[in-house]
C-alpha cells in the first residue's frame, strides 16, 4: 500500500505535470507544473489538518466528524498502560497508511481541474479555489461514496447507491464537471477559435501519459487496500482499458483525419484509464477492453467536436476526458459489473448483463452521476463567483499575452542563448 501511495503521488508530478505541461504553450509550461507541485504540498497539509477527518471520520451521514483532526487517532501514540507505542488501525492496515493513500487522491483531483483554466487563471485564485473546493466539495463527496454515506452501495442509500471502486464520481466526474464550470465562467483564452493554439511539447505529453498509465496501477489496484485476487483483477482491467483506449482514439483519428497522432494515443490511454476507474473492482477483462474502446471514441468526440460546437475553452480537455470518461465509466459499471469479481451483493447478480436485464444497479449509477454533477457543478459555480468578486479569477490581458511563467512566477521554462 505504501508503494501504491507513491505511485498515485507520481501521477500528479511528474505524470500530470508533464502531460499538462506539454499541452500548453511554451510561455506557460512552468505555471502548469507549479500548480501540480504546489498542490502536492498544499492539499497534503489540508488533508493532515482536517481533510481526512471530514472525509473518513465517523461512518455514514453527509460529512465526517472531528475524530481525526490534526492526525489525532491516526498517528502512533505511546500507551502508558501497555508501556509501548500503539498504532491505530483501519481494518488490517495502519490508519496512517489509509490516510496517506486517500490523501494522494485529494492531491490529484484539484490538479486535474487546473487543465480547464490553464494559461489564464490567477495563481492566487487557483490556490483559494483548491482549498475551498477540496474542503466543501471533495471531502463530503468522498464521505458519501467511500465512508457509508448516501451514495455508497447500500439498501439505505439514494437509489440503492452506486459502485465506485477507485474514484469515478469522487475524482473524475467531480473534477471534470468543476473544470467545465470553471472554463465557462472564466472565459476562453485570447485567440480561442481565431488563431492556432498549439501544444508546445508533445514529447512531454506522451511521457506524462505513460507515467500516468504506470501510476494508475497504484490508483486502481491499490484501491482494494490489500493484495489478493481482486487486486490482480483490478490491475489487469486497468491495463486492458488503457490499451484499448489508446488504440481506439488513434484509430478514430486515422479514419477521420487520415493520420493517427501521438497526442491521440496518449489522450486515449488516459481516457481508458478514467473510464475503468469506477469499474476496476467489478468488471472482467473483456468488458474492460470494450469500455476502453468506448472511452477512446466518446472522449475523442467530446474533445474534438463537442467543445467547439458549444464554444467553451476547456484548455487541456479536463472535462472532455475526465468528466465525459468518468461518466461513461460509472454508467458502464452498471452494465458490466459482475459478482465474480467482487460479490458485493452476496450472490445476487448485479450488472445489467449478468442480472438478465435488471436495471437496479444501472439506475443507482446514473443517479450517483446526476448527484455528483449537480453538487460539484453548482458548488463550483458558487465558489468561483465568490472568488471572482473578492480577488478576481483571470489574469490581466498583458499577463496572458506575456505568459504566466514570467508574470506569475518570474521564471522561464526554456533559456535559449
Image (cartoon, rainbow, N blue to C red):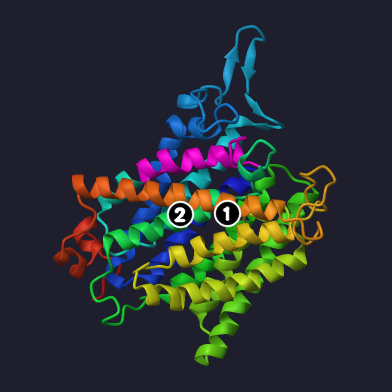
| In-image side of 190 versus 87 (left or right) | left
Visible residue check, residue 324: yes
Give the residue drawn at x 62%, y 24%.
88
In the rendered image, the vertical position of residue 394 relative to residue 160, given as above or below: below
Determine the image quadrant of residue 227.
top right
Q: Quadrant of the C terminus?
A: bottom left
Give the residue drawn at x 44%, y 30%.
50
Residue in front for this viewpoint, 89 or 150: 150
Question: Taken as a whole, is the magenta stretch helix, strand or loop?
Answer: helix
Residue 218 position in % (x across, y down): 62, 52
Q: Which residues are magenta?
A: 130-152
Residue 186 position in % (x across, y down): 27, 60
In the rendered image, the vertical position of residue 25 relative to residue 90, given as above or below: below
Magenta-colored stretch includes residue 225: no
| In-image side of 42 versus 72 (left or right) | left
Circle 2: element type: helix
Determine the image quadrant of residue 155.
top right
Residue identified by numbered label 1: 168
Question: How crowded is the residue under tag 1: few (<14 C-alpha within 10 Å), some, or many (20+)?
Answer: many
Residue identified by numbered label 2: 175
Mark 1 or mark 2, which is nearer the start of the sequence? 1
Magenta-colored stretch includes residue 147: yes
Task: Determine the CA span between mark 2 and mark 1.
Answer: 10 Å
Residue 260 position in % (x across, y down): 54, 86
User: Which residue occupies the extreme top position in the image?
Assistant: 81
Amino acid at each position: 500500500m505504501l508503494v501504491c501511495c507513491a505511485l498515485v503521488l507520481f501521477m500528479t508530478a511528474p505524470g500530470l505535470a508533464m502531460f499538462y505541461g506539454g499541452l500548453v504553450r511554451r510561455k506557460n509550461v512552468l505555471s502548469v507544473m507549479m500548480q501540480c507541485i504546489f498542490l502536492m504540498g498544499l492539499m497534503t497539509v489540508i488533508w493532515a489538518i482536517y481533510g481526512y477527518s471530514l472525509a473518513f471520520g465517523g461512518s455514514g451521514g453527509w460529512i465526517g466528524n472531528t475524530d481525526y483532526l490534526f492526525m489525532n487517532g491516526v498517528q502512533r501514540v505511546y500507551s502508558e498502560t501497555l508501556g509501548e507505542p500503539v498504532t491505530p488501525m483501519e481494518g488490517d492496515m495502519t490508519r496512517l497508511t489509509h490516510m496517506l493513500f486517500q490523501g494522494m487522491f485529494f492531491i490529484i483531483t484539484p490538479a486535474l481541474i487546473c487543465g480547464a483554466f490553464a494559461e489564464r487563471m490567477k495563481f492566487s485564485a487557483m490556490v483559494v479555489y483548491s482549498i475551498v473546493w477540496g474542503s466543501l466539495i471533495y471531502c463530503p463527496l468522498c464521505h458519501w461514496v467511500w465512508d457509508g454515506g448516501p451514495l455508497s452501495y447500500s439498501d439505505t442509500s439514494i437509489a440503492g447507491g452506486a459502485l465506485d471502486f477507485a474514484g469515478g464520481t469522487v475524482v473524475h466526474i467531480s473534477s471534470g464537471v468543476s473544470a467545465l464550470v470553471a472554463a465557462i465562467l472564466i472565459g476562453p483564452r485570447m485567440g480561442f477559435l481565431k488563431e492556432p493554439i498549439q501544444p508546445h511539447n508533445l514529447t512531454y505529453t506522451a511521457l506524462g501519459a505513460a507515467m500516468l498509465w504506470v501510476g494508475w496501477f497504484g490508483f486502481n489496484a491499490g484501491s482494494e487496500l490489500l493484495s489478493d485476487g481482486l487486486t490482480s483483477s483490478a490491475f489487469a482491467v486497468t491495463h486492458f482499458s488503457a490499451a484499448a483506449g489508446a488504440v481506439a482514439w488513434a484509430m478514430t483519428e486515422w479514419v477521420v483525419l487520415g493520420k493517427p497522432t501521438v497526442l491521440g494515443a496518449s489522450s486515449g490511454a488516459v481516457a481508458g484509464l478514467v473510464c475503468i476507474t469506477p469499474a476496476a473492482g467489478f468488471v472482467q477483462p473483456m468488458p474492460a477492453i470494450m469500455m476502453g474502446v468506448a472511452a477512446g471514441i466518446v472522449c475523442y468526440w467530446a474533445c474534438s467536436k463537442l467543445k467547439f460546437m458549444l464554444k467553451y475553452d476547456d484548455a487541456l480537455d479536463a472535462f472532455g476526458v475526465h468528466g465525459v470518461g468518468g461518466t461513461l465509466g460509472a454508467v458502464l459499471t452498471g452494465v458490466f459489473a459482475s459478482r465474480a469479481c467482487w460479490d458485493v451483493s452476496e450472490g445476487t447478480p448485479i450488472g445489467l448483463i449478468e442480472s438478465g436485464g435488471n436495471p437496479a444497479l444501472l439506475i443507482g449509477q446514473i443517479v450517483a452521476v446526476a448527484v455528483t454533477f449537480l453538487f460539484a457543478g453548482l458548488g463550483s459555480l458558487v465558489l468561483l463567483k465568490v472568488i471572482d468578486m473578492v480577488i478576481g479569477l483571470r489574469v490581466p490581458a498583458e499577463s496572458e499575452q506575456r505568459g504566466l511563467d514570467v508574470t506569475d512566477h518570474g521564471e522561464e521554462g526554456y533559456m535559449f542563448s
